[in-house]
Amino acid sequence: MKKNIKNSVDDLQLYFAQDMQAVDKLINSYITSNVTPVISELSNHLINAGGKRLRPLLTLAASDLCNYSGASHIKLAAAIEFIHTATLLHDDVVDESFQRRGKPTANILWDNQSSVLVGDYLFSKSFQLMVETGSLKVLSILADASSTISEGEILQLSAVRNIKTDESTYFKIIEGKTAALFAAATEVGAIISNVEDKEADALANFGKALGISFQITDDLLDYVGSEEVLGKNIGDDFKEGKVTLPLIKAISKSSKEEKRFWEEVINKGMQKSSDLEHALLLMRQHNVFDETRSEAIKWSKKARNYLDIFPESKTKVILQELTYFVVERIT
């Protein structure tokens, strides 16, 4: 099944357009501060920068799939978006990034201190919204996810410029920094709907597998994508010494001479302008890109299979199509 990428995402956004308007209204009300304009200005810069809003949309879709009726899904979708935005603000400071979604990062337009503190502010707002749902289970899921995200980010930091990082460590990193929030976004939609555990577990597993596929694809796009698609510079992971799946696979297949190259450019960070192109050449020679794409497709299929227990519906079809979208971004 091959879907047009934009149509898959557009279908999701269009189907939940009314709910997303309510989410946006709630978000804007929560980032308005009487203390300092920096909070709303900096938050608005990233929140309204044209992101796909997949995570809050997943919460809305999961609750709809479970026939939820109420208003808590709006609050939880906003909370999910706040958590995601907070992690992006922190990430850009840690990574010393200059561009996100095709625009200068907040830490460049303002400063590192403001980015970190506004990220903290958004985290606090997300927990206010969680509490308003009155569900301790929801609070527990999102608190655990927030902790797991931090662990994943810290683990990734320890793996930077370390070519001994293996696939097991890589998957721990992306399960933490990316898949945990995808899983929480879908699981809380089920929890507020009071469905059976098997359905809630299926949606949590769907979100986790989707998040893993999404991150593997993102890491591959850093080498084979375009700046237009990524909204950031190609080869940033390579230049920053981030050891992602394409690099891990290339290193595992490298000769002694190639390993010396990886040690120079990754471990020691001694890179020339031509080194990225040489790295791409080695990856192509070892069929790394196809293997990485196959791994992303495998997790995409896993995600799709977790939806089998749900009856047929428009929402189920949209979520199934979404599993294709995450890997179809690779041209």
Image (tube, helix red, strand yellow):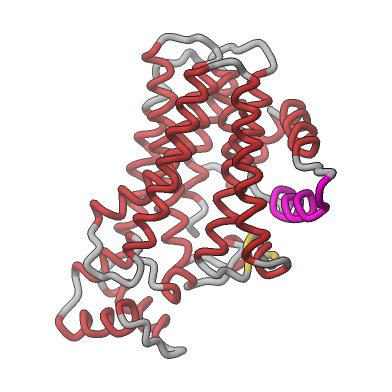
Is residue 42 in the magenta section?
Answer: yes
Residue 147 image-quadrant placement: top left
Where 233 sits versus 174, above or below?
below
Residue nearest the observer in this picture, 96 or 283 = 96
Where 100 sits versus 80, above or below?
below
Q: Position of residue 52 (x, y in %)?
A: 64, 46
Q: Position of residue 79 (x, y in %)?
A: 62, 33
Q: Position of residue 145 (x, y in %)?
A: 45, 36
Majority SS type along the magenta span: helix
Where 21 sits versus 62, above or below?
below
Q: 77 left or right of 305?
A: right
Q: 131 left or right of 156?
A: right
Residue 259 image-quadrant placement: bottom left
Span colored in magenta: 35-48
Residue furthest out toward the front: 35
Residue at 60%, 18% in the rendered image: 64
Residue at 25%, 55% in the rendered image: 167
Residue at 48%, 38% in the rendered image: 181
Residue furthest out toward the left: 256
Residue 158 image-quadrant placement: bottom left
